[in-house]
Image: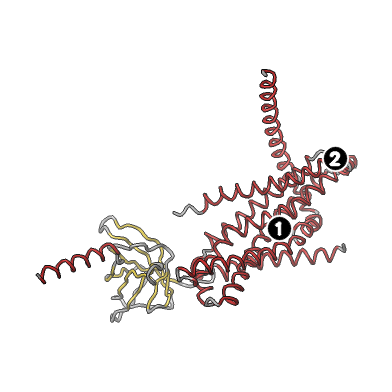
């Protein structure tokens, strides 16, 4: 009995120190990546290639889900607002909820599962098949050649994807609200323009998406780079990427929101 | 994939992203509003501004002619001091009245300007002499109750 208690306490200590060590490694990893970014900016073609795989190929899922999220917001918002006779505020509801929260968060979650998992699997497999070691043998730094371009591609494409998600969502809300249900078009746009502030709402949304892009790409790259070089290890790392970055997005979103919109 | 097609797609992607940001800024937000136009500031003191917020519209005859700027408390006169930023296109006489109004029953509060008959126009930095405070619902109800009570007294 006592032996088991000692064992479980020991295991707890081991797990804790393991987590702290991995966190330290992750921080060292991102610092190394940022330090080696100069090389990848001089070879911008590498970043463009990664932008194609992370950004352009995520376009379809981002645009389609943005459209549908906006349409559902339009339908549900109309149902609720109509009971208060203020359905002309539909534009405000759709625009504010998309620009402030749903755009960055849902685009970030989709980005984590579409692009983040792909990055982890790719780097994990590169490690498992010893491509990274081969690069080191040829005196090519894998962080500068493989990791840094993917980091910057994710960092650049995430805010753009979030902006497209929000714009598409507002278009979806317009389609359902104005075209389908028949809310007055003038009040839909003018109330939206009165209520949405450029600095307060749109810029804060963009800041959120930049932070999410940083977090998701960092987690995805690190999980891939740190994955055990086996088939099982790569699959586990891919799962961890999606879970960890989704939790990171939601947690960071709460933090950022409490800083940005304190309702002063 | 061919290098140039890759570049083309990425270029289109970045353009679409920046386009979406521009749409958000111009069509959804209020970047296209008064922020770029030439404006002048006038001041108004109110006994009570109710729920007036900075950036609320300033309307005359229902047309938006400017925005509310800073709202501060004047510690000498014990009144609220409101900065009104008016578009240069609109000139108002010196004896214009400003009042805090509400759009609709539960709508936002704004400042309504009613022009007077003076020949001289308001200039940058002028202060409005005539102002009307916001209607406070509690005061309105108590007034109504008092007048009802007074009516009851006279009837007896």
Could you tell me how many numbered marks the image carries?
2
In which quarter of the view is residue B15 placed?
A: bottom right
Q: Nearer the viewer, residue A200 or A86?
A: A86
Q: Residues within 10 Å of mark 2 (few under 14, many from 20)?
A: some
Above or below: residue B128 compared with residue A246: below
Q: Relative to A87, is B111 on the left or the right?
A: left
Residue B42 at what x, y percent from top left?
Answer: 36, 68
Q: Residues within 10 Å of mark 1 (few under 14, many from 20)?
A: many
User: Label 1 to label 2, Cα distance in Å?
Assistant: 30 Å
Q: Nearer the viewer, residue A4 or B141?
A: A4
Q: Which subunit holds the residue at mark 2?
A: A
Q: Relative to A14, is B55 on the left or the right?
A: left
Q: Nearer the viewer, residue A237 or A196?
A: A237
The residue to which callout 2 is attached is: A230
Above or below: residue B55 compared with residue A137: below
The residue drawn where x is 52% and y is 49% is A259
Q: Which mark is residue A157?
A: 1
The residue drawn where x is 78% and y is 50% is A119
Residue B65 at what x, y percent from top left?
Answer: 42, 75
Residue A229 at what x, y percent from top left?
Answer: 84, 39
């Amino acid at each position: 009995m006592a032996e088991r208690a000692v064992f479980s306490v020991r295991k707890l200590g081991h797990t804790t120190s393991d987590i702290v060590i991995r966190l330290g490694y992750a921080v060292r990893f991102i610092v190394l990546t940022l330090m080696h970014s100069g090389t990848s900016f001089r070879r911008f073609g590498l970043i463009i290639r990664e932008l194609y795989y992370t950004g352009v190929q995520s376009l379809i899922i981002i645009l389609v889900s943005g459209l549908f999220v906006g349409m559902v917001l339009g339908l549900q918002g109309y149902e609720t607002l109509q009971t208060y006779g203020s359905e002309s505020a539909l534009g405000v509801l759709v625009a504010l909820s998309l620009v402030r929260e749903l755009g960055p968060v849902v685009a970030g979650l989709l980005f984590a599962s579409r692009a983040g998992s792909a990055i982890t699997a790719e780097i994990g497999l590169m490690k498992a098949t010893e491509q990274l070691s081969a690069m080191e043998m040829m005196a090519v730094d894998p962080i500068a050649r493989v990791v840094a371009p993917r980091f910057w591609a994710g960092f650049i494409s995430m805010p753009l994807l979030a902006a497209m998600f929000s714009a598409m969502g507002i278009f979806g809300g317009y389609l359902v609200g104005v075209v389908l249900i028949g809310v007055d078009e003038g009040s839909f746009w003018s109330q939206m323009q009165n209520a949405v502030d450029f600095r307060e709402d749109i810029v804060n949304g963009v800041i959120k998406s930049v932070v999410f892009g940083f977090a998701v790409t960092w987690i995805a790259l690190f999980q891939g780079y740190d994955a055990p070089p086996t088939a099982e290890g790569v699959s586990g790392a891919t799962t961890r990427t999606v879970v960890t970055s989704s939790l990171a997005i939601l947690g960071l979103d709460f933090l950022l929101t409490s800083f940005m919109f304190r309702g002063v | 994939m061919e290098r140039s097609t890759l570049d083309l797609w990425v270029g289109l992607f970045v353009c679409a992203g920046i386009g979406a940001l521009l749409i958000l800024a111009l069509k959804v937000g209020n970047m296209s509003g008064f922020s770029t136009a030439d404006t002048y500031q006038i001041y108004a003191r109110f006994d009570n501004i109710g729920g007036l917020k900075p950036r609320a519209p300033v309307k005359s005859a229902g047309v938006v002619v400017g925005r509310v700027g800073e709202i501060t408390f004047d510690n000498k006169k014990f009144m609220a001091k409101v900065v009104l930023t008016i578009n240069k296109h609109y000139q108002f006489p010196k004896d214009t009245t400003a009042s805090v109004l509400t759009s609709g029953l539960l709508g936002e509060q704004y400042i309504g300007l009613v022009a007077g008959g003076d020949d001289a126009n308001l200039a940058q930095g002028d202060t409005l002499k005539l102002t009307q405070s916001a209607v406070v619902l509690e005061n309105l109800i108590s007034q109504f109750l008092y007048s009802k009570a007074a009516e009851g007294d006279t009837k007896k």
